[in-house]
Image (cartoon, grey):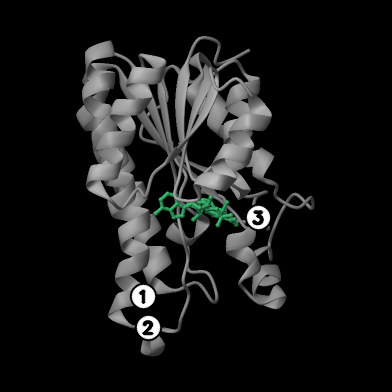
Amino acid sequence: MELEGQVAIVTGPAKGLGKAIAERCFAEGAKVALWDIEFNGASEVASKLDPTGTRAKAYSVDITDEEAVEEAIKETVSDFNQVDLLVNNAGISLHKPIDEMTLEVFERVMRVNVTGTFLCCRAVTPIMKEQKRGKIVNIASLAARTGRPGVGVNYAASKGAVVSITQTLARELGPHGIYVNCICPGPILTEQTRQYPPEVFASWNVGRAIIKDGLPEDVADAVVFLASDKSAWITGVTLDVNGGILMR
Ligand SMILES: NC(=O)c1ccc[n+]([C@@H]2O[C@H](COP(=O)([O-])OP(=O)(O)OC[C@H]3O[C@@H](n4cnc5c(N)ncnc54)[C@H](O)[C@@H]3O)[C@@H](O)[C@H]2O)c1
């Protein structure tokens, strides 16, 4: 039980990576607040984990909505008293070649992936500062580290920004006992990646050193490590979880 007694907020836990992260944090002993714009999906995950709602509870939150995030943090603290871990997992990808990408599509992805991450980090900061401890794990992407065929500039830019937010916040909040790290997952089949043609998805796996397919649970395990006391001298890192597609 690596996270016994902790309270974790996971954004985007209704499906995909976020669902696995919420489930793994719960299995490691954490109480979990599931923040998702898809409230029904998050509720289903929460009630499977804990039908009583005392150790897992869903909240209807659009992370791009400043007021909604502020409301959600108030409710979460009122329900669970503390926040030890924030996992900024919610994210979207809307891919288009640059000459077909409208400003609306560019900004929509930046708003969820960057502004949403910023708003959630800002919301937990006063609580973690007061506790003099806390961990933030941001989910960026391999797309931030290297050009990926078929990935739009909006998504790549947004995930590059998540890496920069991680490093800046790690320095800013480290003196307060708050750790900020990020994970760059490689390709994992989820609703988000199923929108890409299979040949594009397959091309992202080229050069993989480990032959097994990446799973949401592989990312969830890395989150637990970064959330646990086993990573007591690790902050500001970008952890590649990609079977060796990219080695840096
Ligand atoms: N799947 C991959 O291959 C892969 C690789 C690298 C990085 N990532 C990143 O991992 C994260 C999870 O990806 P996934 O593949 O599980 O995606 P997904 O589409 O399966 O799930 C995304 C979740 O985020 C929620 N969400 C979306 N917008 C939201 C908003 N405005 N407010 C609150 N919740 C919102 C959705 O409702 C959903 O539950 C994303 O940040 C994604 O960019 C995924």
Q: Circles 1 and 2: CB distance less than 8 Å? A: yes
Name the residue tied to disc 2.
Answer: 101
Question: To which quarter of the image does residue 193 belong?
Answer: bottom right
Q: Is residue 241 visible?
A: no
Residue lying at 51% horizontally and 26% vertically, measured from the top left: 32
Disc 2 residue type (three-letter): Met
Q: For residue 91, which quarter of the picture? A: bottom left
Q: Does residue 95 show up? A: yes
Residue closer to the observer: 58 or 16: 58
Which residue sits at x=71%, y=69%? 202
- Nearer-N-terminus badge (1/3): 1
Foreground of the two, 142 or 78? 78
The residues tagged by marks 1 and 3 sit, at their Cα atoms, a distance apart of: 23 Å
Q: Which residue is mark 1?
A: 105
> x%, y% of residue 173?
24, 26
Q: Amino acid at mark 3?
A: Ile
N-terminal label among 3 and 2? 2
